[in-house]
Amino acid sequence: MNHSLSQNQVNLLKDCLALALDPKTQAEADRQFLDLQDSLNMDAATSEVVQKLWAEVLAARRSAAFWERLSDAEKAISDGLADDHLRLQQNYLRLVQEQ
């Protein structure tokens, strides 16, 4: 069994993967992927495997987006703590100089 994709199908797959990057556009990515899958004329078993792989891609992209947001929040907290620490240190030095 040897399948090759047309350039249009390759472009559609690239579009699907690009849309899958953002959880907000994953529904559109899923719709386009179903269109792509229909155009491939696969047997039922192959289609099921491809569909499961696509579901894993979407889950991995959602997971990556979650961890990226969590990392951004952690960075913001860390930056805020560093700023507070610096401010406290400067206040302490000012108090010591006033005494």
Image: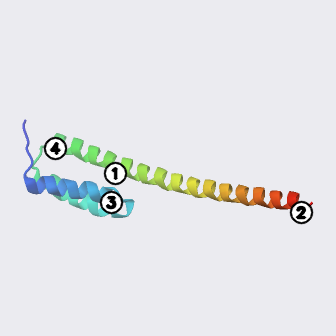
Sequence-first disc among 3 and 4: 3
Q: Which mark is residue 44?
A: 4
Foreground tag (3 vs 4): 3
Q: Which residue is mark 1?
A: 58
Q: Residues within 10 Å of mark 4 (few under 14, many from 20)?
A: few
At horizontal 24% and vertical 57% (from top left) the residue drawn is 16
Q: Residues within 10 Å of mark 3 (few under 14, many from 20)?
A: many
Cβ–Cβ under 8 Å for marks 3 and 1: yes
Sequence-first disc among 1 and 2: 1
Sequence-first disc among 3 and 1: 3
C-alpha span from label 3 to label 1: 7 Å
C-alpha span from label 3 to label 4: 24 Å
Judging depth in this view, the residue of 17 and 79 nearest the camera is 79
Q: Which residue is mark 2?
A: 98
At horizontal 7% and vertical 51% (from top left) the residue drawn is 6
Residue 99 in which image quadrant: bottom right
Sequence-first disc among 2 and 4: 4
Name the quadrant of the N terminus. top left
Q: Which residue is mark 3?
A: 26
At horizontal 7% and vertical 44% (from top left) the residue drawn is 4
Sequence-first disc among 4 and 1: 4
Q: Amino acid at mark 2?
A: Glu
Q: Residues within 10 Å of mark 2 (few under 14, many from 20)?
A: few
Cβ–Cβ under 8 Å for marks 3 and 4: no
Q: Name the side, left or right, on which 16 lies relative to 44.
A: right
Q: Amino acid at mark 4?
A: Ala
Cβ–Cβ under 8 Å for marks 4 and 1: no
Foreground tag (2 vs 4): 2
Residue at far right of view:
99
Foreground tag (4 vs 1): 1
Q: Name the side, left or right, on which 17 lies relative to 23.
A: left
